[in-house]
Every structure is written in C-alpha cells, then in structure tokens.
Amino acid sequence: MPDKKPRRVSYSFTTANKTDVIEVGVRSSKDGTLEVCPVAEAKEARITTEYQRPNKPKILTKVPTGDRPAKVNINQAIEDYELLLAVDTNTEVIAGQRLSVTAVVTARLVASADAGMKCEYEIPLSIEFTSIHGNPERIGWVLALKELLRCNRINQSSMIGMVVDSELGLLTEFNSRREPLFGRDYLLGGIELIYGSSDAGAELVPNMLIKMADKASGTLLKQLKSGTRHNSLRAPTLGGACTSVAIHWNSPSTQAPQHQDSAGGSNHP
C-alpha cells in the first residue's frame, strides 16, 4: 500500500479590526489539546489540512473556527459541534433529463470508554430531484436542510457542522451569510459549512462522513439509472429550479466506528 502523504495543518484568520501587529499564541488545553489563539479579535478563522502536490496543495479539510480557540487536530476541532451533517450530490443525465441524488449523513461525536471519541452516525435520507438550472450540489444542500428542519431533525439554535465537498472558494461567504446557498436561501441559524474531500483523507472524520454520503448518493443514482422509480414525488421547489423532488427516508441504522484523535492509516493518498 502506498504511504500516506505528509499532512500540513495551517491556521488563518482575518482580524476584526485594522491592526499593525498580529500576535498569535499557542497553548495546551486541560485535555492536552494544542490550541491556537490569536491575541487580536479574529473573524472568519479556519484551520486547514492539506498535502503538497506538484501544481498546488490538495485541500483535505477546512474547518471554520470563528472566534473559538483553534484546535490543531481536525478530529478534535469538530468536537465543538453538537451535530455533524455530511451532504453530497451526484448527478447524471438519464433519458435526456438531469437527475440528481443528494444523500445526508448525520453524526455525533461521543466520548468512549478508552478516552478516545466514538462517531455515531446514520444515513437518514436521500433526496432525488430533477433540476433545470443551478449547481445541483447547492440545490441539494438547501433541500436537505429544509427537510431536516421540517422533520425536527435539526434545530437552528444548535451548533451544527455541515460537511460539503463543493464550492470551496465560497465557503467563507456562505458562512458569513454574505452569499446565499441558492436563490434567496442563506445558511440557517448555527450551521457552519466544513469542507471535506470525499476522495482523500479518510482518517479525518469530515472526510469519512462525506465519503459515506457520496457512496449513498451514488448507490441510489445507479438504481434510478437502472429503471427503479419511486412515487414520493413532491411539488417543484426553490423557485422552479427543480421540476420534481422525491424524499427517501431510510430505516434508522446507527453505527459507531471508533476514531482516534490522532488517527493515522497508510492506505489513503
């Protein structure tokens, strides 16, 4: 198996006010976690994990930290969220129609008996839709959030990290509510978008979750391509961006893989 490429973790932020001097401190928290703390008031801060490539770095994960102390380990940084979501969409043109499937993974990190963390997750639903225009990924984000909110599966007052693998360059704009996710729909309440690559970095929890969502989305899309059709269609939504929407709720199936705070592995790029 090929060796895992060396990871580089970086912390970046914008100061809330104009300043001539920027100071950043590093401290160890009570549990031994290494934290980065800018002395100046920070905004739009983020911690990024990447590895080097000949042309440009491969971004594995980017987690916003706001004004919170930034934990250097990504798997520890996401422990600040009460709930994690991973939302991914696959799209194909079938019989002349652009058909998309969005899959949703929900997960919580809980302490395990061996002092590590346990990731309890499920794949509660998938959404099938046909779209006329717009990025299907962004349409899928809005449809997923609306459905989860409608069914009381998420609470706008909770701190939620939503993992996506699209529009990396716009995530700061989405998180600051300067850019709508789609149409007039902005990010809800306490939700923050996290970037995770679905094709690398599976030792990182966000990447593991988005890879699950990608696989679930692709599986349903293959079924639809083979001729399987479902009857749970709903009226078009999002200002006519979709001509049909079908919600597929799955039976509860919570699983609990373990992850270590300094997870490794050698079979990932």
Image (cartoon, rainbow, N blue to C red):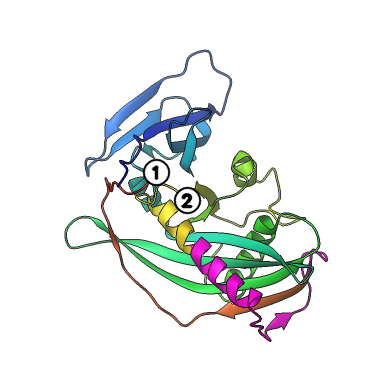
Residue 234 in magenta stretch: yes
Q: Is residue 65 above or below residue 253?
A: above
From the viewer's perspective, is 78 left or right of 262?
A: right
Q: Position of residue 93 (x, y in %)?
A: 73, 65
Residue at (54% x, 26% y) in the render? 15
Taking depth in this image into account, of 181 and 26 the one nearest to the observer is: 181
From the viewer's perspective, is 144 left or right of 241?
A: left
**Magenta extent:** 213-242
Q: Position of residue 86 (x, y in %)?
A: 50, 60
Q: Is residue 106 above or below residue 49?
A: below
Q: Is residue 164 above or below residue 89?
A: above
Local crowd size for mark 2, using a 10 Å CA cut-off: few (<14), some (14–19), many (≥20) = some
SS at mark 2? loop
The residue to which callout 2 is attached is 199
Q: Position of residue 46 (x, y in %)?
A: 48, 37
Q: Quadrant of residue 253?
A: bottom left
Name the kind of residue labelled 1 in the image: Pro
Looking at the figure, which quarter contains the C terminus? top left
Task: Decide which of tag 2 and tag 1 comes sooner along the chain.
Answer: 2
> Mark on residue 269?
1
Q: Residue furthest left?
A: 114
Name the kind of residue labelled 2 in the image: Asp
Q: Is residue 24 visible?
A: yes
CA gap between label 2 and label 1 equals: 8 Å
Residue 237 in magenta stretch: yes
Residue at (71% x, 50% y) in the render? 180
Residue at (66% x, 72% y) in the render? 128
Taking depth in this image into account, of 1 and 208 the one nearest to the observer is: 1
Q: Quadrant of residue 31?
A: top left
Q: Is residue 154 visible?
A: no
Taking depth in this image into account, of 95 and 46 the one nearest to the observer is: 95
